[in-house]
């Protein structure tokens, strides 16, 4: 599986590395890739809260039938100086590719990142991909400080124009399509806060019931849950990214659940069911890692368009936060990500006590 791409850049080579079936199974290259990511997260945030553990990273980068994922290391005379990843959707969005480049701090500003990116883009072109997506998450501080800002094409949100990530993306022909706000919630939320918000939501949510589960969606609702998850790729703001909607079915839901189990991730979900029709109107998901017990991730939250206006997003989030308090008593924070133009969901998060902690630029390059 390992492939090498020797390049004329002072002895630099970029090599695709295998992803181990189990961490420790001939995993030295992958462990180097993971260690590079951990070092970057510590440099950027001062903690590992946003960094997957090794087994989770290995499970993810093995890919699945819906997305091929490739991992690369860049070597300078045998020393690891950077990494790259390439993601290739296989079911939908088959003309797009996700690219990511990371260079270790001592080796930056020497053109190595540009070389890694060129390899990724050339490989993607060879697979018929005509649009490249990249993401860069950073702490809130730099965006709020002095300096010029670059506005996203979505019309809301901006990133520092003079930051290294912005200059790198612009230099290589990428445009800032969207900015997401990273928010953090101190956990647990006081019960009096939840009761007040729940009372407000209940006034507008008559005729709906909340169903919750841990780790596996009940068989009797998995098909309707899959239909609701399909909306997650079409009914949330995606600015000008132009992605096709994902098609979910029960098998895809079960595959995601199996991935979480193999990664050591515990999951709780809450859905709002319309009592008159049995349809699922809204859902939300939280995930937790035993290896990082203080942090909970707020994953998807969605209310189907025809059911909006009933405070269902707030209702299911309250139910899930209560369940999380029971299951994960050592957790001290919840993290979530929302497009800056998603004012409704941001308002729900603010009401619950989330506060902005970072931003993520979402970049795209389209070939002529």
Image (tube, rainbow, N blue to C red):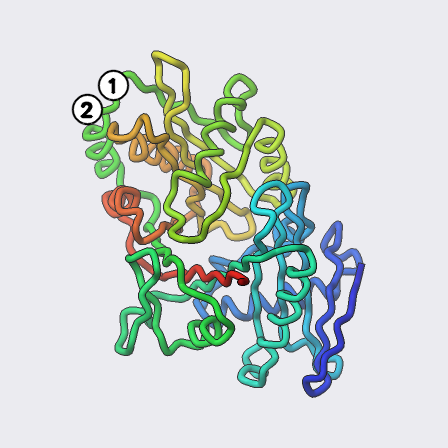
Distance between the alpha carbons at the discs numbered 1 and 2: 7 Å
| Residue 368 on image: x %, y % | 53, 62
Q: Provide the secondary structure element on which disc 1 rests.
A: loop
Q: Secondary structure at mark 2?
A: loop
Dot 1: few (<14), some (14–19), or many (≥20) neighbours within 10 Å?
few
Residue in view at x 44 percent, y 34 percent? 231
Residue hosting label 2: 203
Residue sitting nearer the eye, 112 or 62: 112
Q: Which residue is mark 1?
A: 206
Q: Residues within 10 Å of mark 2 (few under 14, many from 20)?
A: few
What percent of the width, then of the height, locates residue 159? 35, 68
Q: How many marks?
A: 2
Give above or below for 92 relative to 128. Answer: above
Give yes or no for contact between labels 1 and 2 (Cβ–Cβ under 8 Å).
Answer: yes
Q: Residue at x 48, y 26 (%)?
A: 225
Query: Where's the N terminus, which quadrant?
Result: bottom right
Residue 284 in picture, x, y percent from top left: 41, 35
Q: Quadrant of residue 114?
A: bottom right
The front one of 196 and 85 is 85
Q: Nearer the viewer, residue 226 or 215?
A: 226
Left or right of residue 125, residue 171 in this image: left
Residue 136 circle label: none
Could one spot residue 197 in this view of the protein?
Answer: yes
**Residue shown at 68% from the left, 69% from the top:** 73
The answer to which image quadrant residue 351 occupies is top left
The picture quadrant where one finds residue 207 is top left
Q: Position of residue 263 (x, y in %)?
A: 62, 45
Residue extending furthest toward the front: 368
For this rendering, which residue is in front, 156 or 43? 156
User: What's the residue at 44%, 38% (across, down)?
Assistant: 232
Res. 332 visible in picture: no
């Amino acid at each position: 599986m390992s492939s090498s791409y020797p390049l004329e850049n002072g002895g630099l080579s970029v090599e695709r590395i295998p992803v181990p079936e189990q961490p420790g199974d001939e995993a030295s290259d992958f462990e180097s890739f993971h260690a590079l990511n951990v070092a970057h997260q510590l440099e950027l945030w001062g903690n590992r809260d946003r960094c997957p553990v090794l087994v989770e990273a290995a499970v993810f980068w093995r890919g699945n039938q819906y997305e091929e994922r490739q991992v690369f290391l860049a070597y300078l005379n045998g020393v690891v100086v950077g990494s790259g990843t390439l993601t290739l959707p296989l079911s939908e969005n088959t003309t797009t590719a996700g690219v990511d480049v990371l260079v270790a701090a001592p080796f930056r500003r020497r053109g190595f990142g540009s070389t890694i990116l060129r390899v990724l883009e050339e490989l993607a072109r060879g697979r018929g991909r005509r649009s490249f997506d990249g993401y860069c998450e950073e702490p809130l501080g730099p965006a709020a400080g002095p300096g010029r800002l670059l506005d996203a094409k979505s019309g809301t949100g901006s990133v520092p124009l003079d930051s290294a990530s912005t200059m790198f993306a612009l230099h290589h022909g990428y445009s800032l399509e969207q900015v997401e706000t990273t928010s953090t919630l101190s956990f647990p939320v006081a019960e009096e806060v939840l009761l007040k918000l729940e009372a407000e939501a209940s006034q507008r949510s008559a005729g709906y019931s909340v169903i919750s589960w841990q780790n596996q969606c009940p068989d009797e609702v998995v098909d309707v849950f899959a239909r609701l998850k399909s909306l997650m790729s079409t009914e949330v703001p995606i600015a000008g990214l132009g992605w096709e909607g994902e098609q979910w079915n029960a098998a895809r839901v079960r595959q995601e659940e199996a991935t979480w189990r193999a990664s050591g991730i515990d999951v709780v979900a809450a859905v709002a069911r319309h009592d008159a029709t049995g349809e699922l109107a809204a859902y939300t998901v939280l995930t937790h890692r035993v290896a990082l017990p203080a942090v909970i991730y707020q994953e998807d939250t969605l209310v189907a368009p025809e059911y909006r206006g009933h405070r269902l997003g707030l209702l299911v989030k309250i139910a899930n936060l209560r369940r999380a308090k029971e299951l994960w008593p050592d957790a001290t924070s919840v993290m979530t990500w929302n497009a800056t133009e998603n004012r409704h969901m941001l308002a729900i998060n603010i009401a619950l006590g989330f506060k902005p902690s970072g931003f993520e630029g979402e970049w795209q390059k389209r070939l002529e």
